[in-house]
Image (tube, rainbow, N blue to C red):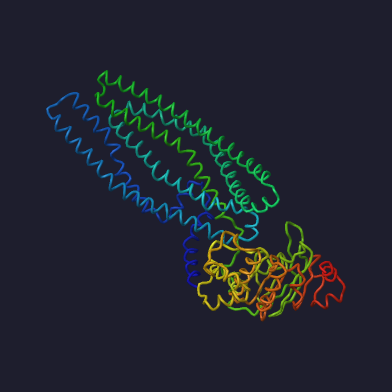
Amino acid sequence: MGENKEKGKIYETENQEMIEMFEQHTGGNLKMLMRIFKGHYWELAGSIFFFIIKHSPVWVLPIVTANIINVATYRPETAGKVIVINSVVMLVFLVQNIFTNYIHTWLYSKTVREVERDLRIALVNKLQLLSIPYHNGIQSGRLQSKVIRDVEQIQNLSSQIFITILSILLNIVVSLGVIIYKSRVIFLFFGLTIPAAVFLIVVFKGKIKIYNREFREIMEDTSAKVMEMVELIPITRAHALEEEEKEKMRNQLGTVAKRGLKLDMVQTWFSSISWVMFQAFQVLCLGFTGLLAFKGKIEVGDITLYQTYFSSIVAQVSGVITLLPIIAKGLESVQSIGEILTEEDVEQNEGKEKLEKLNGDIVFEHVKFSYEEKEILKDLNLQIKKGETVAFVGDSGAGKTTILNLLIGFLKVEGGKILVDGHDLSQVDMRSFREHIAIVTQQSILFTGTLRENITYGMTDVTEEQIQKAVKGANLEELVKSLPEGLDTKINEHGSNLSGGQKQRISIARAFIRNPDILILDEATSALDSVSEKKIQDSIEKLVEGRTTLVVAHRFSTIRNADKIAVIGNGGIMEYGNYEQLMEKHGKFYEMRMLQA
């Protein structure tokens, strides 16, 4: 476990700079993209250098072709020698491409893959820091889309910038350089393509950016809805709502198709108009250079040279225009992941006091909390002594689970304070506090892995004896024996190959093995039938011995032996005492108990 923490600190340090770059950034998305590659500039420079060398045959071929055509046309005495030399030079340029292309690709791919990895790690790190209310307020499918799809789009954008656009710029610069050296008149003619390209980009850029943003947002929404649909399939099937669910998804996917078509058509107009325009310029170039050769202003072979270079320029400018939608998507993705990396709703733990050990004394002093302006807790005062078990009961929405979440630190108090062993939790590193607690929630959360891995989640220095003790304590022995590979049996996604009671007992075993100082049970037996509940109740009673325990339960049979019971309502504690005391009062607790009789 200690080794994992050290690795985590290393990764957090490595990627904190990435997060800070986004937080401090004030420029455009393209500028931000360049900053993402900070620390990799030398690799990129090397990649560009070898790219130029490996790409050189493209620029040399028109010159060699023109030389050979001119020599073949005018037939000087040295014609054979010139043709051989030009051919050998061209072959050398071609062969070197094998080696320089390999070096260029290795340097570039290594850089991009490392940045891609760092971006995803930075996103994962930030997601682990963001508050629970933030996660509750955003669909998990949207977050998944940002971590997978948006980072992939940025990787595609990087490929376009450092390979395709670099190639385009080099081809244009070299072509124009050769042409201005050979003929300024033809260079001026070539210059007409640039304003035409700028005009097209200005006309279409705004629309493409808007449509790309709309498409990205609808895809994030769709990703979230698909995940939701998959998770709801058992409920959908149970209530015969397949057609309603299919209709809902048809409407959503229909919207995606419409937005996608809108984006495709504006991009089609963009590419079609640009292609026709530049092909027309190419025809004019052919006619113009042919006329100059006819008048003796240039050599016949130079027609091929100019036509090849002009074709190259046309292709490169057209390429820039075609790439514009891809670049727009990539820059939109830079902004998208920036939304996560610059989010300020994080749990601040740095520089706060770390708790090395806990006794388990808990005090709520004048605690206040509201949900969206609805006051849940007005003035909660409660003292829980070390080793005491306190159960919270009350109507739905009274604030029982809220009290637990405030103690865990998932929510922040809006007034008052919570003290643990005299330490104000607002001044404590909550990560150090949570190392001493264990939680069993109403919904059993299991991951795809072995039964052993689910029980020992996050712990690496666990002995087999501890695991067996936890299994026995959670009454899992029969389950382990029934499984084909025992503790090493794989659990399906969300534990679909287990019953609700079995999943809940695994969660309880996970709490057992942590040997916590403070135990929190939020409807821990809610998924159990009466028989299973009775079996596990003895285990829970053993688990709570000597530990401070906070329990939320609707079944009064599970809290009968609690040291104290707090009836929550009207923003605070309505009644407080043990089971017998509250029953004798014939108050709110008595009424609730009678309803379950």
- As drawn, the residue found furthest toward the left would be 77
Residue 115 in the image: state x and y as whole percent.
44, 54
Left or right, 461 with reference to 256: left
Left or right, 333 with reference to 363: left
Which residue is found at the position 24% from the left and 43% from the top? 95
Q: Quadrant of residue 289?
A: top left
Residue 301 in the image: state x and y as whole percent.
25, 26
Residue 464 in the image: state x and y as whole percent.
52, 76
109 up-or-down from 367: above or below:
above
The quadrant the C terminus occupies is bottom right
Q: Quadrant of residue 471?
A: bottom right
Which residue is found at the position 60% from the left and 41% from the top? 253
- As drawn, the residue found furthest toward the top would be 295
Which residue is found at the position 42% from the left and 43% from the top? 160
564 up-or-down from 170: above or below:
below
Residue 35 in the image: state x and y as whole percent.
46, 52
Which residue is found at the position 39% from the left and 31% from the top? 314
